[in-house]
Image (spheres, rainbow, N blue to C red):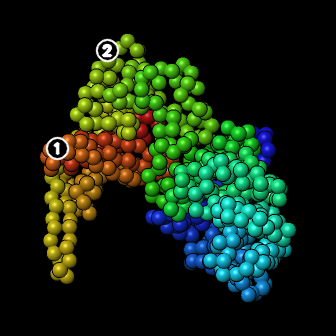
Amino acid sequence: MTGERIYLYDTTLRDGAQTQGVDFGAADKVAIARELDALGIDYVEGGWPGANPTDDAFFAALPKLSRARISAFGMTRRSGRSAGNDPGLAATLASGAQLGCLVGKSSEFHVKMALGVSREENLSMIADSVALIAERMGEAIFDAEHFFDGYKANPSFTLDCITAAEKAGARWIVLCDTNGGTLPDEIERIVREAVKVVPGEKLGIHCHNDTGNAVACSLAAVRAGVRQVQGTINGLGERCGNADLVAIIPSLILKMGFSTGVDEAGLKRLTHVSRFLDERLNRPPDRHAPYVGESAFAHKGGLHVSAVTKDPRSYEHIEPELVGNRRHVVVSDQAGKSNLITRLRECGIEIDPSSDKLTRLLEAVKEREFVGYAYDGAEASFELLARRALGTVPEYFKLQSFRVIDERRWNARNEVVTLSEATIKVEVGGERLMTVAEGNGPVNALDTALRKALLPVFPELEEIRLTDYKVRILTPQDATKAVTRVMIETTDGPSYTWSTVGVSTNVIDASYNALHDSLTYKLWRSRERS
């Protein structure tokens, strides 16, 4: 990591907030900013002062960061106003941030159609605004909106816009592919022209992912000379998202030889930061995300596993640990003994390859997957299956029976009300118990009733919560009599999450099977494995 320096500018707190279904609170922004700082990001864009109450609350109580500098987003002055008398710029200046990033038009089409001003006035708006921010805040960044489309239509005017920002004192001029429609080869060609008028050490790149090329476009721009990259964690952003810094950072460092503010220790936090953001937003992580996804270093075929065991470079482009991830050997009906042995070793189980128990376990996996179980996405259920086959998992509780009743009725206000009630009989520590609980659905009621019986004996179950619940119909030709598979994801905090599976023709029974494994795995992990 001793190559030329690339600066990282994160826009998760602003661009990420424009993602459909994402709604940051001020506390979320503070927590995310601190994670970005610990990662080694150079700039954290806090939001747009004056745009909404959440951004105002964030800037009113800015977190203290040790490395990252907080940027306030704004726009160039309005036509007909001086920079010093523009309310938008005033909000940026009063934000308390360490620098300001201003967006302005760099496309002749948008200058005429959106702003309705002359080209000369647009250049003055850029220069006046940047100069004021540079003077008052010490550092100014100019985001050249629609730069690439503008360049294709009128190269001279678009280059005049970024030149005006540089002459006015901008530390960085960021070339924006605002609608995400420019391809990597175009990005590289146009950036090479831009560096002829503005030095590359003053240029940045900001790409959207509308063609699925935001990461590639960002790396192409770096290759062409820019030295700042903007993006978001996990590629959050409006429409198809922004360039994903989680993929860009290790590519810059490990593939292209550049250095960034993310050192070796920071790089090992990358998987944590990616999953922290998803956890904060209550979103399931993308299992197939490059570098950090649960499946990024997963191996399913026996031939692949044999090769990886001998030489990880065969099917892995980097060591997973470099980015805080891990190798994951999937056990499925495609698995051979090599998969099984490797997966058992990851669980801390050593077994003789010639053991009959290993053969029987492999047959059991294949038989269970034939009827609908899927262990490639339910590692906790697999580990329990393996340990039960070896006789090493205690029976913490034993179900006697359960009953679930659903009621749908109209209340006194003539509103539809649905309620689930579960009654469960279970043996815990030699004592037979019966509990009843209500829930907003049958699985919730069943979970609540079961925990009511178990918590007095197993208080550690208090800290776990279900984070995902999936049902898949395995035999659709059987209609409402179909076999169903339930996958449950459970967590006891941002540091550890596990998945379990249950299969039955009755969806409640399948749910109980997955829930039973989830609770058992937590108890075994906290009591036997620790």
Q: Is residue 508 above or below residue 361?
A: below
Q: Is residue 104 above or below residue 340?
A: below
Picture quadrant of residue 195? bottom right
Q: Which mark is residue 477?
A: 1
Residue sitting at x 63%, y 69%: 47
Q: Which mark is residue 232?
A: none
Q: Amino acid at mark 2?
A: Asp
Residue sitting at x 37%, y 52%: 468
Regarding mark 2 in the picture, which secondary structure is present there?
Answer: helix
- Image check: 87 left or right of 370? right
Residue sitting at x 57%, y 70%: 26
**Could you tell me if residue 261 is visible in this image?**
no
Residue 273 pos. (x, y %):
58, 51
> Which quadrant is home to the N terminus?
top right
Residue sitting at x 37%, y 32%: 383
Residue closest to the eye, 264 or 433: 264
Q: Earlier in the sequence, mark 1 or mark 2?
A: 2
Q: Residues within 10 Å of mark 1 (few under 14, many from 20)?
A: few
Q: Residues within 10 Å of mark 2 (few under 14, many from 20)?
A: few
Q: Amino acid at mark 1?
A: Gln
Residue 179 pos. (x, y %):
58, 62
Q: Are marks 1 and 2 in contact (CB under 8 Å)?
A: no
The residue that label 2 is drawn on is: 356
Q: Nearer the viewer, mark 1 or mark 2?
A: 1
Q: Is residue 213 above or below residue 296?
A: below
Residue 506 pos. (x, y %):
17, 46
Q: Which residue in the rendered view is the most extreme toward the top? A: 354
